Image (spheres, rainbow, N blue to C red):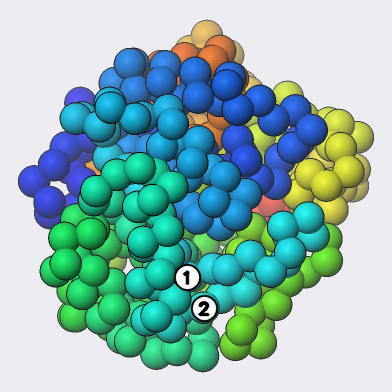
């Protein structure tokens, strides 16, 4: 059941845990550190090995949270964190990209301290800085691997060309990008109108917008519009790189449990184009079809979304985020859900969502 983590020789549980929402962007008034620590430990005890965080999330708070949760419990866990984004104003969530070597070296050291570890398992370049050649950033990160501070390197939200450039300097272990049933950019041209391709490995059952240092607009979680310029998933598979989808449940929308008036002030989704009342109504066809498939299996919509991702390719390791023990247990059961080929094709063909991603 386990999946290879790049070409590291390491295998991990097919689902990881995304910890961002425990510290950043979503319903922060309901943040509960002790409960979040308990959820991280429950995930670890259930066999989840890939735990995802970043220095950006809560300006270090999330890394400290993960460090507390996993202190003394590192033997079978892969901690993934990120650098290359800098928080300018935590309250307003203004951030900028900074891929300069000196910044990345400093952020690696800060992450080591906050996580309370001697070595980081997987360190991603969170976003490519347009003002710094990716080769400079990647060479700096390669040097911290040589220094023993980091084991493996990853990229987040990159183009195929950027991935190629980095991979030629130092092996890329994982690429993280948004991929779900309503964000299919990494599957290549036309992906938002359905995948338009055969599955690579059929199973047979199978607030104010911040700015970057380079001048491009950023959203409050440090992302700009999709940077995929082709079938990024296929590139990762061909190069022995793991593909790690973030927001695999469409930031909660695809679960079918959200309402457009259910977001507090400050929640990222309150001003997101896909979460307006109009978009909610227009995107109902997507959630209705997911719910129909779920009903056929006595499953949740979230489980169907995760099973679809797991069925796309053996190198996919989604990282659904949750602060709920119940949702964690439900998500993990997605690894046991076998969608039929017809169901996979139906989900592949879902319409493009209404509303821009950011």
In which quadrant will I find the N terminus? top left
Residue 71: x and y in percent read 34, 30
- Residue at (16, 37) in percent of width and height: 11
Outermost residue to the left: 9
Disc 2 element: loop
Q: Are marks 1 and 2 in contact (CB under 8 Å)?
A: yes
Q: Is residue 192 left or right of residue 233?
A: right
- Residue at (28, 27) in percent of width and height: 72
Mark 1 vs mark 2: which is more N-terminal? Answer: 1
Quarter-wise, where is residue 327 in the image? Answer: top right
Disc 1 element: loop
Quarter-wise, where is residue 264 in the image? Answer: top right
Residue 228: x and y in percent read 47, 70
Q: Give the labeled residue for mark 1.
A: 84
The numbered disc on residue 294 is none
- Residue at (20, 29) in percent of width and height: 76
Residue 161: x and y in percent read 35, 81
Q: Which residue is nearer to you in this view: 23 or 254?
A: 23
Q: Give the labeled residue for mark 2.
A: 98
Q: Is residue 229 visible?
A: no
Q: Which residue is nearer to you in this view: 340 or 115?
A: 115
The alpha-carbon separation of the residues under discs 1 and 2 comes to: 5 Å
Residue 317 sits above or below residue 128 on the image: above
Q: Is residue 41 left or right of residue 259?
A: left
């Amino acid at each position: 059941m386990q999946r290879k983590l790049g070409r590291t020789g390491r295998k991990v549980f097919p689902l990881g845990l995304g910890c961002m929402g425990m510290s950043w962007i979503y319903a922060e008034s309901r943040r509960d550190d002790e409960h979040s620590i308990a959820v991280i430990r429950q995930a670890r005890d259930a066999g989840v090995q890939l735990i995802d965080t970043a220095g950006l999330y809560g300006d270090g708070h999330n890394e400290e949270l993960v460090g507390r949760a996993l202190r003394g419990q590192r033997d079978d866990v892969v901690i993934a964190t990120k650098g290359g984004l800098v928080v300018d104003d935590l309250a307003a969530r203004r951030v900028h990209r900074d891929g300069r070597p000196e910044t990345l070296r400093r952020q690696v050291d800060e992450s080591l301290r906050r996580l309370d570890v001697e070595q980081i398992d997987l360190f991603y370049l969170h976003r490519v800085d347009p003002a710094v050649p990716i080769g400079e950033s990647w060479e700096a990160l390669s040097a911290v691997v040589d220094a023993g501070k980091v084991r493996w390197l990853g990229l987040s939200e990159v183009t195929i060309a950027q991935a190629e450039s980095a991979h030629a300097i130092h092996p890329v272990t994982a690429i993280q990008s948004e991929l779900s049933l309503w964000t299919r950019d990494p599957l290549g041209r036309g992906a938002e109108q359905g995948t338009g391709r055969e599955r690579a490995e059929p199973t047979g059952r199978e607030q104010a917008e911040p700015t970057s240092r380079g001048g491009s607009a950023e959203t409050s979680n440090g992302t700009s519009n999709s940077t995929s310029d082709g079938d990024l998933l296929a590139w990762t598979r061909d190069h022995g790189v793991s593909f790690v989808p973030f927001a695999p449940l469409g930031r909660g929308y695809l679960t079918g449990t959200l309402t457009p008036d259910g977001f507090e002030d400050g929640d990222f989704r309150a001003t997101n184009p896909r979460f307006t009342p109009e978009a909610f109504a227009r995107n109902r066809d997507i959630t209705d079809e997911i719910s129909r498939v779920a009903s056929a299996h006595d499953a949740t919509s979230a489980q169907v979304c995760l099973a679809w991702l797991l069925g796309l390719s053996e190198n996919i390791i989604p990282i659904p985020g949750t602060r709920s023990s119940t949702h964690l247990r439900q998500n993990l059961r997605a690894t046991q859900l076998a969608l039929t080929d017809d169901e996979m094709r139906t989900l592949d063909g879902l319409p493009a969502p209404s509303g821009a991603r950011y």
